[in-house]
Image (tube, rainbow, N blue to C red):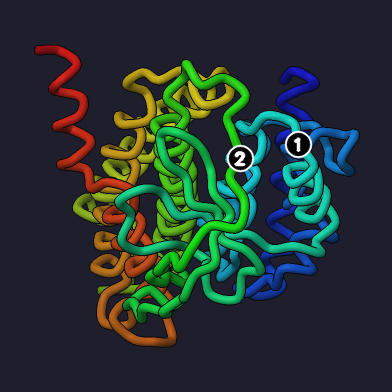
């Protein structure tokens, strides 16, 4: 394993330990852990890391089905700030996010539901031409998945308008890719958690005097789940590298389309293989299934991303 890989494993271990204490990690906890400022440049108080490290955290949050504001207020917000040209307002926002004194949310042009807008100090409206800091009304939207917070944002006016560092690049498209890949990584974590839980259950659950894991149908189902997870890991890895390098290619759509659909399938199989207990509140499988279903629909459904892929080959 390379030193880079060792760092990721250490980050994964620390994240797993912190998130295992409870599914909900509040904003101060994320700031204290240093996760919010992972991609913030060192001169602004951040770690100066890349999206590859952020993706590790996203995966672990999916594995724990953790209720946080990380997606909207860190993954997307810091991604937007890093796209902007230097200015006093950008300096204030970047520093504030890194220290935890400011929590942002991001809404994109034409977006219906905004992650983590409720309770945010400021809202960034991202368009193809630039980014506006807007005065807005935030209307919470209840969803079946209790680990995510979505809202409708109605902009009442702009207080600041910020320019991209490089206007020749499709920054809005790259931001959508970032959101898609973050959800794909989260879904990968969901699927891995459900696979591990199912295998563990199959080893101890007895039927006809034998562990159900010894039955061929159960073994084949678990093997199919493992194959799906391994394929998703390869696609997500390629998509993360694409985001790190600011490439607008097919990797993000491939990962989002496959990983988010796969997570729903794996969580559904996990519920079935847990038998009757899998359908109870006590099992917790429903939490993962609902999170996977919402991941699948946010920032483009699998069908929408497959259509996007098809257009590139016409």
Quadrant in the picture for residue 305: top left
Q: Earlier in the sequence, mark 1 or mark 2?
A: 1
Residue shown at the point (40%, 61%) measured from the top left = 198
Residue 12's label in the rendered image is: none
Q: Position of residue 130 (x, y in %)?
A: 50, 37
Label 1 Cα crowd, 10 Å radius (few <14 / some 14-19 / many 20+): few
Give the Cα separation between the discs numbered 1 and 2.
Answer: 8 Å
Report the front residue among 258 and 268. 258
Inspect this view and state whether residue 95 appears: yes
Give the camera-side residue of 131 and 200: 131
Q: Which residue is mark 1?
A: 87
Residue hosting label 2? 162
Q: Quadrant of residue 292?
A: bottom left
Q: Residue at x 55, y 53 (%)?
A: 124
Number of numbered discs overlaid on the protein picture: 2
Asked if the residues shown at circle 1 and circle 2 are in contact, with their CB atoms under 8 angstroms apart, the answer is yes
Q: Residue at x 41, y 72 (%)?
A: 151
Q: Position of residue 235 (x, y in %)?
A: 39, 27
The quarter of the displayed image where residue 254 is located: top left
Q: Secondary structure at mark 2?
A: strand
As drawn, the residue found furthest toward the top would be 314
Find numbered disc 1 in the image and state the secondary structure of the residue it sits on. Answer: loop
Instruction: Give the x, y percent position of residue 8.
Output: 71, 34
Q: Residue at x 47, y 45 (%)?
A: 126
Which quadrant, please, contains the C terminus?
top left
Residue 95 position in % (x across, y down)? 83, 49
In the image, 98 versus 266, the foreground residue is: 98
Note whether 284 is above or below 62 in the view shown: below
């Amino acid at each position: 394993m390379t030193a880079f890989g060792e760092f990721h494993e250490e980050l994964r271990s620390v994240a797993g330990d912190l998130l295992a204490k409870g599914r909900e990690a509040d904003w101060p906890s994320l700031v204290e852990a240093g996760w919010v400022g992972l991609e913030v440049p060192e001169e602004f108080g951040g770690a100066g890391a890349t999206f590859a490290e952020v993706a590790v955290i996203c995966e672990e949050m999916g594995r724990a089905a953790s209720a946080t504001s990380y997606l909207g207020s860190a993954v997307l917000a810091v991604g937007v700030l890093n796209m902007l040209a230097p200015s006093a307002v950008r300096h204030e926002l970047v520093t504030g996010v890194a220290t935890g004194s400011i929590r942002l949310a991001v809404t994109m042009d034409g977006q219906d539901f905004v992650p983590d807008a409720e309770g945010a100090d400021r809202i960034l409206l991202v368009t193809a031409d630039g980014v506006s800091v807007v005065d807005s009304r935030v209307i919470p939207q209840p969803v079946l998945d209790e680990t995510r917070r979505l809202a409708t944002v109605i902009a009442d006016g702009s207080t600041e308008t910020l320019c991209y560092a490089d206007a020749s690049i499709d920054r809005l498209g790259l931001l959508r890719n970032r959101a898609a890949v973050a959800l794909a990584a989260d879904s990968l974590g969901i699927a891995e958690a459900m696979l591990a839980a199912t295998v563990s259950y199959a080893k101890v659950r007895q039927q006809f005097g034998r562990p159900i894991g010894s039955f061929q149908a159960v073994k084949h189902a678990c093997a199919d789940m493992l194959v799906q997870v391994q394929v998703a890991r390869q696609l997500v890895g390629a998509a993360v590298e694409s985001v790190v390098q600011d490439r607008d290619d097919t990797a993000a759509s491939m990962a989002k389309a496959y990983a988010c659909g796969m997570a729903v399938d794996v969580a559904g199989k996990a519920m079935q293989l847990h038998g009757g207990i899998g359908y109870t509140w006590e099992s917790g499988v429903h939490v993962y299934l609902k999170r996977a279903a919402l991941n699948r629909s946010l920032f483009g459904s699998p069908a929408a991303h497959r259509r996007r892929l098809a257009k590139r080959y016409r």
